[in-house]
Image (cartoon, grey):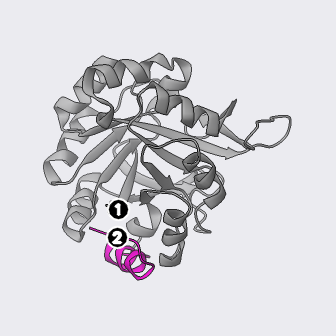
């Protein structure tokens, strides 16, 4: 049985507001997270992702109060990420109303955190948020992609495809694969990156970064994505969730 493709709006939150830019820079205000969450739930989103994009770089935890307010407004699975550094952080987020937890920077610093979270809460709770970009300059990786941290501002030199495979082995339940090169450009998903990661993991892959038209989503699924995530095209009214689902269905992909 083929699982339905999930369509997931993403709330990139900074200082209590949803923001969106290009390649994680030049951020502009996109609205109130609680209001947007309510709207997306009503419009038929399959899940919702809430990312506190400055929590790790600011060295602080994601705002629990805001997560609670968003969770109260939605009846779909809510993934929360940003500033998650320990099992206790995960516990607090789940108690605040999150269904899944995204980890990125802390897992790179200490990969065993993935296993610890999966062991305590189950791997279905754990989403590895992987911000990757094509290598440039002196950086070299086997796949041609490297992992970045702190909202894409910090190069790690770690091979993104190899890291995805290791995270899956450690217990990650899903991979949120965000192309930092495509993020906010609306030029389409990085299908080559999706294909590369799909080839080394058997857990769900969520494609993120680059959505601009309804025609961009089906190729990401064909490349191996189990879900498609977008932000600015939904926040600023360029596309509706129903538009994306119709395009996926027209391309022969099952939807909910």
Mark 2 vs mark 1, foreground winner is 1
Above or below residue 182? Residue 171 is: above
Q: Is 177 within the magenta?
A: no
Q: Which residue is mark 1?
A: 2
Q: Which residue is mark 2?
A: 254
Above or below residue 235? Residue 60 is: above
- Image spot of residue 69 (x, y percent): 18, 45
State the quadrant of the N terminus.
bottom left
Residue at the farthest bottom position: 250
Given contact means CB atoms under 8 Å apart, are the residues at marks 2 and 1 in contact?
Answer: yes
- Residue at the spot 26% in from the left edge and 64% down from the top edge: 40
How many numbered marks appear? 2
- Image spot of residue 60 (x, y percent): 41, 25
- Residue at the spot 33% in from the left edge and 44% down from the top edge: 16
Along the line of sight, which residue is nearer the eye, 243 or 144? 144
- Tell me which corner region of the image, top left, top right, bottom left or bottom right, holds residue 219: bottom right
Tell me if 55 is positioned left or right of 178 in this view.
left
Can I make out residue 166 in this image?
yes
State the quadrant of the C terminus.
bottom left
Q: Which residues are magenta?
A: 238-256
- Image spot of residue 115 (x, y percent): 40, 20
Give the SS element for disc 1: loop
- Image spot of residue 22 (x, y percent): 59, 57
Above or below residue 74? Residue 189 is: below
- Tell me which corner region of the image, top left, top right, bottom left or bottom right, holds residue 79: top left
């Amino acid at each position: 049985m083929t699982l339905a493709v999930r369509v997931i709006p993403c709330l990139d939150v900074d200082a209590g507001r949803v923001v969106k830019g290009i390649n994680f820079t030049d951020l502009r205000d996109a609205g109130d997270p609680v209001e947007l969450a309510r709207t997306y739930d009503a419009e038929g989103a399959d899940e919702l992702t809430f990312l506190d994009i400055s929590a790790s770089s600011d060295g602080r935890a994601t705002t629990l109060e805001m997560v609670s307010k968003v969770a109260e407004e939605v009846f779909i699975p809510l993934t929360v990420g940003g500033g998650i550094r320990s099992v206790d952080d995960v516990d607090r987020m789940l108690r605040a109303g999150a269904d899944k937890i995204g980890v990125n920077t802390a897992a790179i610093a200490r990969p065993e955190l993935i296993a610890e979270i999966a062991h305590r809460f189950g791997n279905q709770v754990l989403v590895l948020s992987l911000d990757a970009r094509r290598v440039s300059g002196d950086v070299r990786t086997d796949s041609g992609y490297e992992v970045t941290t702190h909202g894409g501002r910090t190069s790690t030199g770690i091979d993104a495809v190899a890291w995805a495979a290791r995270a899956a082995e450690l217990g990650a339940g899903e991979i949120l694969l965000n192309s930092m090169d495509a993020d906010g450009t609306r030029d389409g998903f990085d299908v080559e990156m999706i294909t590369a990661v799909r080839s080394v993991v058997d857990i769900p892959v969520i494609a993120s970064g680059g959505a601009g038209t309804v025609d961009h989503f089906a190729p990401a699924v064909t490349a191996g994505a189990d879900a498609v995530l977008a932000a600015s095209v939904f926040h600023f009214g360029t596309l509706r969730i129903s538009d994306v689902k119709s395009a996926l269905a027209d391309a022969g992909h099952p939807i909910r």
